[in-house]
Amino acid sequence: MTNQNVVVPDTKSGISLPMVRLSGSSIFPATAQKPPTAPGTGGGGCISLSAKKKLLLENLEINGGGGAAKINSWVDSMRASSPTHMKSSSQSLSEDQQLPWQQHQQQITLPSALDNFDQIMEASRGKQIVMFLDYDGTLSPIVDDPDRAFMSKKMRTTVRRLATCFPTAIVSGRCRDKVYKFVRLAELYYAGSHGMDIKGPEKGSKYTKTQGTEPVICQPASEFLPMIDEVFKELVAKTKLTPGAKVENNKFCVSVHFRCVEEKKWSEVAEAVKSVLNKYPKLRLSQGRKVLEIRPTIKWDKGKALEFLLESLGFANCTDVFPIYIGDDRTDEDAFKVLKEREQGFGILVSKVAKDTNASYSLQEPTQVMDFLQRLVDWKKLAFQESRM
Ligand SMILES: O=P(O)(O)OC[C@H]1O[C@H](O[C@H]2O[C@H](CO)[C@@H](O)[C@H](O)[C@H]2O)[C@H](O)[C@@H](O)[C@@H]1O
């Protein structure tokens, strides 16, 4: 496996984005086997948007709503991202007023990944499981202060054990350094800034042939660094008079938190973000849990990061791989969608409420995620013991 310079053309801006990635052939034989459809989804856990909605979605996401979307609909969208407001807000808007993530066609209650553990393992039979874990809301509980979103010692121990059994990656909206400081496990892959900053394990990985060489690195949005810095400073200045607003520099994207802002002041946050987006057409908006995020318009997201990591691990065209992606946020949907489209592995949504999702199973909260990961470890150990008998 060798390092290779690759250029990713950005179809929107017309610029080419250099990155380094590993190329390698699969270490597993290719025998196609389709995982069974998750119960309760009828194969339709994936909700397809109509062509019209897709177009609207692209327009809104690319220019942050352009001039058309009013601040009121932004605030409605911000309310819709809060579970206590889920019923009241987005449903009162017409389809054209809604931001992309408000356009629910159907809310799905997914089967529990814990209750269906045996079924998931059965689907993975004969395949290499690869684990992808979101951080906030998945490995750590959601808290008011983003700087204090610590994962428990028990969770860290479980993730460490998991990584001895399966290749494991953390895929987060946070910048890579910050998420690493929270997780502190050198043996993992890390994809920060919603997948726009990927680095392989410091210590090399027993799962790749790259041990002892330079770790894999991928930064497809590196040209946006100065712009993101500028935007960060502008947003800090624009929100400094809004009590509770917090702007976080996530290196290749900026997060504007409104969790601690009084609801009547949410429009100030929306105004600030919208005014900046209007100034920077090469940046777009996405939304997470009580956070508005500004990121480059390049076609790169957590789904692309997942594909890149699979390729780096040598599973590019391999059918004997079984990726499991666990996440709680809208940005994780990009990865769930990739798995659905590849018909490989499963997405697991961490949520207590029904959501419009491409995931196949659900877990309610980080403690359940930990239980699921521990079961995976136990299952692997048992399988290993049985293979030696
Ligand atoms: O992709 P993730 O690892 O889930 O990161 C998404 C964002 O997570 C963080 O914000 C969220 O968690 C905070 C701490 O619990 C919470 O205060 C905030 O309201 C949530 O949105 C992080 O601070 C962001 O930078 C990430 O983009």
Image (cartoon, helix red, strand yellow):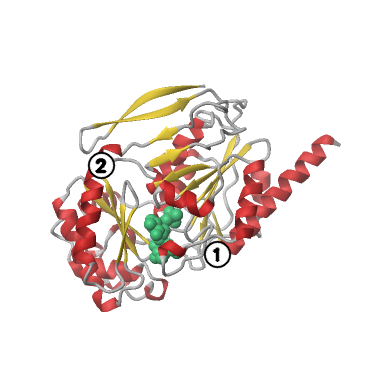
- Mark 1, residue position: 365
Category of crowding for the residue at label 2, using alpha-carbon neighbours closer than 10 angstroms: few (below 14), some (14–19), many (at least 20): some
Residues 148 and 222: in front is 148
Q: Answer above or below: position of 380 versus 30.
A: below
The spot of residue 218 in percent (x, y) is: 40, 35
The spot of residue 113 in percent (x, y) is: 61, 57
Q: Is residue 132 left or right of residue 50?
A: right
**Within the displayed image, which quadrant is ligand 1 positioned in?**
bottom left
The kind of residue on which mark 1 rests is: Glu
Q: Secondary structure at mark 1?
A: loop
The spot of residue 63 in percent (x, y) is: 20, 51
Could you tell me if the residues under marks 1 and 2 are in contact, i.e. CB atoms within 8 Å? no
Q: Residue at x 39, y 28 (%)?
A: 20
Residues 290 and 225: in front is 225
Q: Is residue 79 visible?
A: yes
Q: Residue at x 50, y 35 (%)?
A: 310
Q: CA distance from mark 1 to mark 2?
A: 34 Å
Q: Within 8 Å of ligand 1, the CB of disc 2? A: no
Q: Is residue 281 left or right of residue 322?
A: left
What is the number of the mark on residue 294? none
**Snapshot quadrant of residue 278:** bottom left
- Mark 2, residue position: 224
The kind of residue on which mark 2 rests is: Phe
Q: Secondary structure at mark 2?
A: helix
Q: Is residue 124 visible?
A: no
Q: Is residue 311 left or right of residue 50?
A: right
Kindly report which numbered mark, 1 or 2, lies closer to the viewer in this rendering.
2
Q: Residue at x 52, y 37 (%)?
A: 202
Looking at the image, tell me whether mark 1 or mark 2 is earlier in sequence order: 2
Q: Answer above or below: position of 267 versus 1.
A: below
